[in-house]
Image (tube, grey):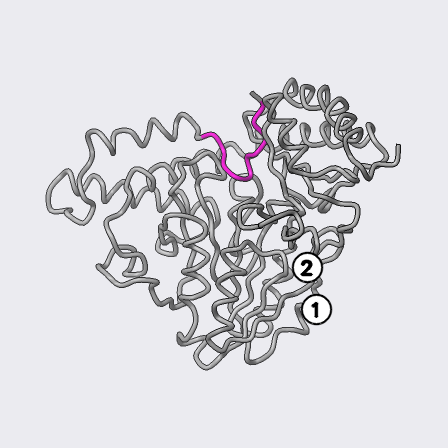
Amino acid sequence: MVYMDNVAGTKPDKRVIDKMIPFYTEKYGNPSAHFYPLGREAFEAIDEARGYVADLIGAENDEIIFTSCGTESNNLALKGVLDTDKTKGKKHIVISEIEHFSVQNVCMKLMNEGYEITKIRVDETGKVDMKALEKAVTPETALVSVMHANPEIGTVQDLKKVGEICRKNEVLFHTDAVAGMGHAEIDVNDFGCDLLSLAGQNFYGPKGSAALFVKNGVKLNPLFDGGFQEKGLRSGSENVPAIVGLGEAARIAKEEMGEYVPRMKKLQKKLWNGLDEMFDFIHFTGDKDDRLPGHVSFWIEYIEGESLLLWYSLKDVYGASGSACSSNIQAEDEDELEASYVLTAVGVPNDICAGSLTFSMSKYNTEDEVDRVLEITPEIVNKLCEMSPYYNK
């Protein structure tokens, strides 16, 4: 098996699992019950994990709120910050046109509640148009949300510039940093952001573990009401094993990124160049240089992304389809399939692109695995070209 869908979820580090297991089997106390040792032990473990996550992104310990996933963190950031002291009366939000669904769909709902949403265009590499962003921000803007890196095309944004624009205009700034966490230098002080979302599953931690950085002084309203866990912003008994796992993943990333990221970049270059040399009708998406390490995304003229994905999977190579059809589940037929909004935003032509493919590698991938992908690709592409009614033979 060659697993190259790591931007969707990485294999947890064994040290993460080992750190979690005792909190299922032996240290199972409720952290709110810190009047006796079993509860105190869980409370202290959460506190330790909070410190590791904060250290990874350059934050203070009390600026970390634990959540269940990146989607929850994004929702808490966008919905929670509205109608607070720094945003009261402001009904305008600015996002990029390639944000994750958990930002896009929140904004669609807010439009129904009277908010104005401005989507900033990106160029053909997926980079946000900074002049358009600067022009879009007004005294009525409550929040700007621009993701650190897009998982479909891999492009990393210049968040330092976004932060400068927001600070100059005294506007709150949120970034969804889920895709790049643990694989890129992410520092909340360097970015100048007020809110930042991250999730453990993208950097060798457990699924169901995530956090939201909330800069001291920024007020939030909770998504739901309950007890006083996580400053009352995320009430409910904490998922101690998941939080411990997230903390351990953050600790490991902080210590070892400098070793495994260069190796991932080397594999990325080998895969990119190898594919590029094979065909003159392959097109890569995203910025070639400013992109996630180990990330290669492309489309091939007249070949469906899902077809590529299926044939690769038959050879036990697993990637993801950043498809021209974002989902076939609700479509009655092919005519109802919708184009990927990310591909559309970067100008991929619908008439000759029927879907893209994303290979995203982790610290566990090897050069032999890259060789395997390059070995089987010509056979797959040639077979699909022969089957395509549009391919000009």
Is label 1 in a helix, a strand or a loop? Answer: helix
Q: Are marks 2 and 1 in contact (CB under 8 Å)?
A: yes
Give neighbour class at mark 2: few <14, some 14-19, many 20+ (Cα, 10 Å).
many
Q: Who is closer to the viewer here, 46 or 387?
A: 387
Is label 2 in a helix, a strand or a loop? Answer: loop
Task: From the top left corner, tell me how far across and down residue 345 is, in percent.
Answer: 70, 56
Q: Report the number of numbered marks.
A: 2
Which residue sits at x=49%, y=56%?
102
Task: From the top left corner, tell me how far across and down residue 202 is, in percent.
Answer: 49, 39
- Residue 337 covered by magenta stretch: no
- Residue 10 covered by magenta stretch: yes
Task: From the top left corner, tell me how far across and down residue 232 is, in percent.
Answer: 27, 61
Give the position of the C terminus as an image quadrant. Answer: top right
Residue farthest along the front direction in this orientation = 332
Which residue sits at x=58%, y=74%?
169
Which residue sits at x=41%, y=75%?
83
**Range of the magenta residues?**
2-11
Residue farthest along the right direction in this orientation = 393
